[in-house]
Amino acid sequence: MNLLITGGAGFIGSHLIWQVIDQPEVTKIVNLDCLTYAGHLENLEGIHGTHPRYLFEQVDLRDKDAVLRVIRQHDITHVMHLAAESHVDRSITGPADFITTNINGTFHLLEACRTHWSDPASSIQHRASRFLHVSTDEVYGSLAPTAPAFTETTPYAPNSPYSASKAASDMLVRSYHHTYGLPTLITHCSNNYGPRQHPEKFIPVIIQSVLQRQPIPVYGDGMNVRDWLYVSDHCQALWTLLTTGKTGETYNIGGQNEQTNLHLVQQICDLIDELDPSLGGNSRSLITFVPDRPGHDRRYAMDTAKISSELRWQPVHTFEVGLRETVSWYLEHQHGARAVTHGFLAEVSRHY
Ligand code: NAD
Ligand code: TYD
């Protein structure tokens, strides 16, 4: 397997590389990443520049020729496509990059694979290759409080420029399977959390706010519901799907772990109070309700019956264990993360 992972310097992509680099099926991993504000090679310290199976290509998916060059030069047989603009708030204040990266970038990658995998001079045949596209639960839209969870057949109803751009890319992937027979899989996962997440995402925002004794910004009434999955459980599901999933299919991935934002914040406050009493306790007093995100989806929930019955995948981490590991990691690494987060919190308060 000559495996291309796009977005490998980001949060989930870097965890994925750590998890699969030593799998016996892997001959080499090529990490394609242009290193936006969200991409950090420090996430791969210990692999980048040292691991014999690892190669890095600093390439922008928007550069069609460069993407084809990478696929050809490394004779890529398998793709796990994670590179994307991924933050909803940024898609509201500046949607353009979401369109060019998430839609055009995915198109370039599909075209490059189609070209290489159908080239009679290439050693790869369609049947032996795989294109796994990592999408999101957000393409399904927003659920009413007691509505059943999203299944793989729930109609798409994206509400933010981010989710609309991901939905568009999913449609392209689907069309390449139906039209050209590209061996694709599409995954829809719920909110990930864990060490090394970019400080703009909600759980790092909460943790860093508490550590700095700053207000914790909770949008609206805090009653929006998200399903949370520990990042390594997501990566395990992606690997299982790449190696044993059925091509042409889509799979939901989730943690069966719905939380209101407010309850999530309260749990993290209490956990930090327990783990670092020197901060003075009573972190819940930092909770601050701020104006809501425009078009804020009320609830996401995932029905994961398909992946659990077909592939026997289940998350390993309970939320209690995963959250404790995550908070402990931030406590150990708070020095490095502080400066970035502080800047971002100032930026958020300017936007809303
Ligand atoms: P991230 O923002 O942490 O990382 C994205 C990576 O993609 C970065 O390394 C960035 O440099 C790279 N990138 C961005 N634009 C690029 C371009 N034009 N060319 C090359 N590289 C580019 O994202 P993440 O949270 O790790 O998410 C990874 C994927 O998983 C995304 O496709 C996202 O939609 C999906 N997803 C994320 C979550 C979540 O909770 N984080 C949940 C479900 C699905
Ligand atoms: P986020 O991590 O941005 O993920 P997504 O919007 O893709 O689900 O946000 C998770 C939830 O937390 C979402 O309901 C918005 C909310 N939120 C806040 O209340 N305050 C914040 O500062 C952020 C970043 C998010």
Image (cartoon, rainbow, N blue to C red):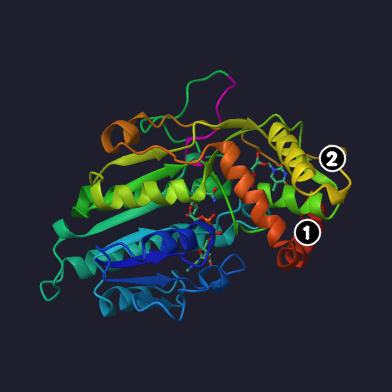
Q: Which residues are magenta?
A: 138-145
Q: Residue at x 67, y 49 (%)?
A: 327
| Quarter of image, res 297 | top right
Mark toward the start of the polypeptide (2 vs 1)? 2
Q: Is residue 42 above or below residue 297?
A: below
**For this view, does 111 lie left or right of residue 301?**
left
Callout 2: few (<14), some (14-19), or many (20+) C-alpha neighbours within 10 Å?
Answer: some
Q: Is residue 97 above or below residue 252?
A: below
Q: In which of the image's four quarters is ligand 2 placed?
A: top right
| Quarter of image, res 218 | top right
Give the structural element (helix, strand or loop) at label 1: helix
Q: Position of residue 272 (x, y in %)?
A: 76, 45
Q: Kindly identify the amino acid type of the residue bearing the numbered disc 2.
A: Thr
| Mark 2–mark 1 distance (CA, rounded to whole Å) | 16 Å
Residue corresponding to mark 2: 288
**For this view, does 273 lie left or right of residue 20?**
right
Quadrant of the image for the N terminus?
bottom left
Q: Position of residue 174 (x, y in %)?
A: 30, 47
Q: Position of residue 161 (x, y in %)?
A: 57, 49
Residue 85 marker = none
Q: Is residue 292 in view?
A: no
Q: Residue at x 47, y 76 (%)?
A: 48
Q: Is mark 2 within 8 Å of ligand 2?
A: no
Residue corresponding to mark 1: 347
Q: Kindly identify the amino acid type of the residue bearing the numbered disc 1.
A: Glu
Tell which of 273 and 265 is nearer to you: 273
Q: Is mark 1 within 8 Å of ligand 2?
A: no
Q: Position of residue 228 (x, y in %)?
A: 56, 39
Magenta stretch: residue 335 in it?
Answer: no
